[in-house]
Image (cartoon, grey):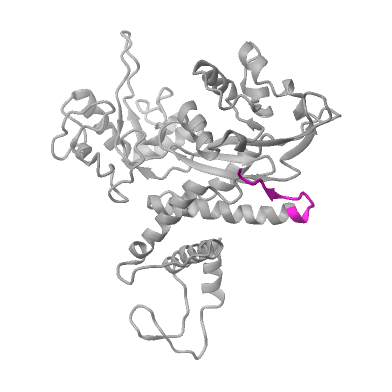
Amino acid sequence: MLMNCMNIYNHALSVVPGAHIPSSFDNKPSKSMTITAEQVSRGFYLNALLRDSIDKGTTVVLPDKGDNDQRMAHAIEHRNNSMILEGQPERMHACSVCERIIPHANGNGVLRSLRAATMDGTGLGRTCCKEHNCAEPPVKLRSHFCATHEHKNSECVVVDCSEQAPTGFQTCENQEHRKLEEHRHLKKKAFFQLKHRLQKRQLSQLTDTLDPSDHPDDNSEDEPEENVYKDSVKKSDQGNRPPKARFERRRTHNEQLLVACCGMILARSTMFGAESITGAKVDFLKSVCPQRIDLPSVIFYDSNCILKAHLIKNKDDYFDHILLPVDVFHFKTKHKETDTFCQEECNPAKFQELLDEEENWIFNSSVAEQVNVWLGGYKAIVRDMLPHRYDFFLDEMIKRRNELLHKKLWDAGHIPYTIQNY
């Protein structure tokens, strides 16, 4: 949006007839007041820092020396740390869309709050250290490892291989590993890329337009995600799996979101490895809600049956007082009827509190998927950002979106408010 506004301004309003404006680069007179992408980015971060300081009653202090990133880096990291400790301003949001007041289960006429949220992840992916689940930032934007694991730059890039790679190669002298590197170089050639695109599009071609010995291979595999290359040979009869290699920089796995059923984003966290139950769900929820009373009454998640089984196995009672149903869409389309545990423990129809008198769902359990579409629109912008700017940008955009949604909910009469911590 900011870049679009910049382009509109530069095209329509930047030229001032008869004016002589000094250029910010060479001090030569100019008749143009064009804005650069760097100036727009700098203005966004400065504006966000100033807004945050006004909200907190503090002052933004920046050093006089260094380039723009160095000058703002400390202030940005300070804001990121405070966001981790305090969370989004709307972390304890509630309104008449995501919260209902219902009779207490004991039937004594007492009312209770039923606040619902949903959880999901979306793959934006910024660069990170190649070491699995390492949260330290890379040494530089184009670096493959952080300072702690920088010594691994000289090791073979094949997964689970720690042999040294000779100068000029990324793999060790193992022939299977070197074969992966040769295959990767082949994939960079123009004809291979065009042929691969044709297969992905599944377009038909007349057989006589191809050399008889060069028909597309129906058994060829698409390039795996996260820049992990694997040998094209099939698994051997002995059961050995083909080796995999990571030639490019690694990227984070996903951004985990906790979203109130009205669409308000309560929390965000970056998952560096896989979207595991222990790390992505249990630890994430406990960090967002350090006190059990802070948890929403209902948390929809597409794999709540696995989460519930994990909690039972580990005798974790932190979530015993809340409902953990699978969201309606995934339960109907992704979960088998033969899964007895899922049907008995996480079927949303089991919880009568989630239905109104006409047996309609009172909460939108797919709202996180809808929010992911919005957040995914920033993927091209943030993918090559430095880690501290990446976190700052996403937190700021979420904060501003929440502010707009808060006003929209208020104008619609849904009475949004913040639950106080005790």
Q: What residue is drawn where x is 42% and y is 66%? A: 38
Q: Tell how many labels.
A: 0
Q: Residue 65, located in which quarter of the rendered image?
A: bottom left
The quarter of the image holding the C terminus is top right
**Could you tell whether 219 is left or right of 6 in the image?**
left
Q: Is residue 90 visible to the viewer in this orientation of the structure? A: yes
Which of these two is toward me, 169 or 422? 422
From what the image shows, is residue 275 above or below residue 372?
above
Q: Which residues are magenta?
A: 410-422
In the depicted view, which residue is nearer to us: 415 or 359?
Answer: 415
- Residue extending farthest to the left is 167
x 69%, y 43%: residue: 262
Q: Residue furthest bottom?
A: 18
- Where residue 364 appears, as percent x and y from the top left, is 71, 36
Residue at 54% of width from left, 45% of height from top? Answer: 376
Please provide percent x and percent y for residue 256.
52, 38
Q: Is residue 242 left or right of residue 40?
A: left
Prevailing secondary structure class for the magenta stretch in the rendered image = loop
Residue 294 quadrant: top right
Name the spot of residue 142 as percent of width and height, x first.
30, 49
What residue is shown at x 73% (from left), y 51% (from top)? 409
Front residue of this view, candidates 67 and 229: 67
Whether residue 205 is visible here, answered yes or no, is no
Give the left or right position of residue 16, taking residue 195 as reference: right
Residue found farthest to the top: 238
Residue 387 at x, y percent in the picture = 39, 50
> Is residue 68 rendered magenta in the image?
no
Image quarter where the N terminus lies is bottom right
